[in-house]
Image (cartoon, grey):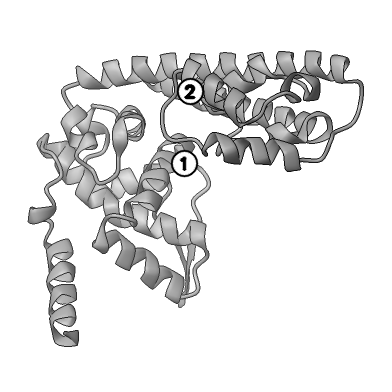
Amino acid sequence: SDVCSSDLRDLVGHRVAACNQLRAHLQAAFPGAVGLFSELDSALSLAFLAAFGSREAAAGLDEDAIARWLASVPHRGNPAPPAVLAARLAAAPPGAGDDGAQAGVTAVLTAAVAGLAARIRELEAQIGAGLAVHPDAHVFTSLPRSGTLRAARLLAETGDCRARHPDPQSLAAVAGVSPVTRQSGKYVSHEFRHSVNRELRDALCDFAGDSRHVSAWAAEIYSAARARGKDHPHAVRITACAWVPVIWRCWQDGTGYDPAKHRALQEILARQAAEKQEDQ
């Protein structure tokens, strides 16, 4: 639902703020923990801080001790080898302040980040479950690189009342991804829309900005906009505006996006294949 999506965005913002606060604290109190793992707010990093939240607690950690600890903690992915982690701890600056008092602050901040992360996972599961039973789920999950959360947000902001957006131009205008055209005599200007559904615009732009990494058609539209001197946000809005008729058609027909039926995409792919053939 749109309420869950809004709550999720708020929680993610709170988690980012809490993680930044934790990082700033550790950089002064316990620098070795900051760059120990790839992400400070990962489950493994938070588990480490819960177990070794101060310089004194981590002082006796050598390669063997870290290896034993890693084996005892459930985690995903592949962290750096124990020898590398031990070397990072040993090479880090010593930190400052009373270690006991700083450890208490570390524990509070770590618990705050972990609590937010847990609530975010719960909301993500709720959103995924709601999306799975929605009759339009297949329309939005079929879009390139949409993912569960992005598809759910697009669906929630677009809605399911087809009559509210009778054509793609009305959807683009409500979303604010198409410019306002003003004319005075012979002078014509195209200006940024301000009175729009900002949540819908953000959802479309978020999708469009990422779609260019997997869609040759979206990538070409974005690159052409940049070549014309548009900055990144403007180029993303142009890409989003190009996506609107495609999304609108799929939404109106209740069908998923099929790249094989996207003529403009297929023309670009055919041209790229021909160019590659010529280069060989």
Please provide percent x and percent y for residue 144.
25, 46
On the question of residue 35 being in view, the answer is no
How far is disc 2 from disc 1 in space, using C-alphas?
A: 22 Å
On the picture, is 185 further left or further right than 56? left
Query: Which residue occupies the extreme right position in the image?
Result: 97
Total marks drawn?
Answer: 2
Q: Residues within 10 Å of mark 2 (few under 14, many from 20)?
A: many
Residue pointed to by mark 2? 8
Residue pointed to by mark 1? 196
**Nearer to the camera, 34 or 129:** 34
- Identified at 66% across, 41% down, the residue is 87
Please provide percent x and percent y for residue 254.
12, 34
Question: Which three-letter amino acid code belongs to the residue tagged 1?
Answer: Val
Question: Which three-letter amino acid code belongs to the residue tagged 2?
Answer: Leu
- Identified at 48% across, 23% down, the residue is 8
Please provide percent x and percent y for residue 213.
34, 56
User: Quarter holding the N terminus?
Assistant: top left
Residue 139 sits above or below residue 53 on the image: below
Residue 100 sits above or below residue 28 on the image: above
Residue 16 sits above or below residue 106 on the image: below
Please provide percent x and percent y for residue 143.
23, 43
On the picture, is 230 further left or further right than 169? right
